[in-house]
Amino acid sequence: MLTAAAFDLPGELPGTARYVGPVLDDPDWAAGEAWTPPPGEGPLVLVAMSSTFQDHVACLQRVADALAQAGVRGVVTTGPAVPPGAVRGSDRVQVLAAAPHAEVLPHAAAVVTHGGHGTVMKALAAGLPLVVLPHGRDQADNARRVALRDAGVTLSRRASAARIARAVRRVLDDGRYRDAAARLGEAIRAEAATDTLEVELESLVG
């Protein structure tokens, strides 16, 4: 399974199941994009939602508005499913089609996401707390895992900009979330750094 055992929920697995750690690379459509941080000195929040369309433009707009209300700098990446012009930014909130998260995350203090596994893994591996607004698929389960470990908070995808702004300030200002994300991130990085995936794949053809 392409996830970290430290992130999963307790439960009995089949004897053939193996945790091989997450893949933390940027997707091809985001890797290599030029990026510079938005101006200002406040904390930076990365917003990354689905790379496929989930009727999430209105949610992205409320998140972008929330970052302006929260007094933070923001980087909103719309991905290949939504043109960046569909979301209105501000002087301190960039709206981009893509940015290499491997470059953005070291500058960030928190992540707002729909709860896709890839984004959650990358955020936690960077030790960053999350605000999760699940839209579908596995996202509610991932949000539950984050909340159970105090590594972030979960909101409805229909949450208002004001409520999202309060959640962003909460994970930024309460050190409990940063500390929990850092602990979980350390375990995730350790699993991602192993060669378990290669070993298991080789065993299938060996």
Image: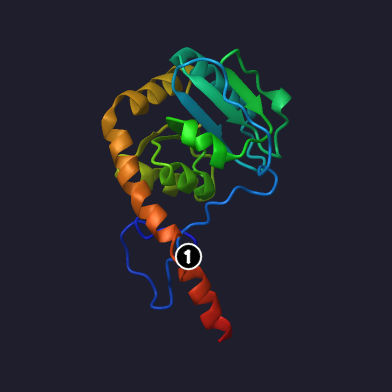
Residue at x 48%, y 25% (from the top left corner): 44
Residue 58: % across, % down: 61, 25
Compared to 161, does 5 lie above or below?
below
Residue 204 figure quarter: bottom right
Q: Which residue is mark 1?
A: 1
Is residue 113 in sight in this rendering?
A: no
Q: Amino acid at mark 1?
A: Met
Q: Report the number of discs.
A: 1
Residue 38 in the image, given as x and y percentages of width and height: 57, 20
**In the visual, does 27 lie left or right of 139?**
right
Residue 98: x and y, percent?
Answer: 66, 36
Q: Which residue is located at x 55 percent, y 79 percent?
A: 202
Of the pair 176 and 54, the residue shown nearer to us:
176
Q: Position of residue 51 (x, y in %)?
A: 64, 43
Considering depth in this image, is 161 or 196 the residue closer to the camera?
Answer: 196
Q: Dot 1, how many residues are within 10 Å of its Cα: few (below 14), some (14-19), or many (20+)?
A: few
Identify the secondary structure beneath mark 1.
loop
177 lies left or right of 60? left
Farthest residue in the bottom direction?
206
- Examine the image and state in which quarter residue 124 appears: top left
Q: Is residue 201 above or below residue 192?
A: below
Quadrant in the picture for the C terminus: bottom right
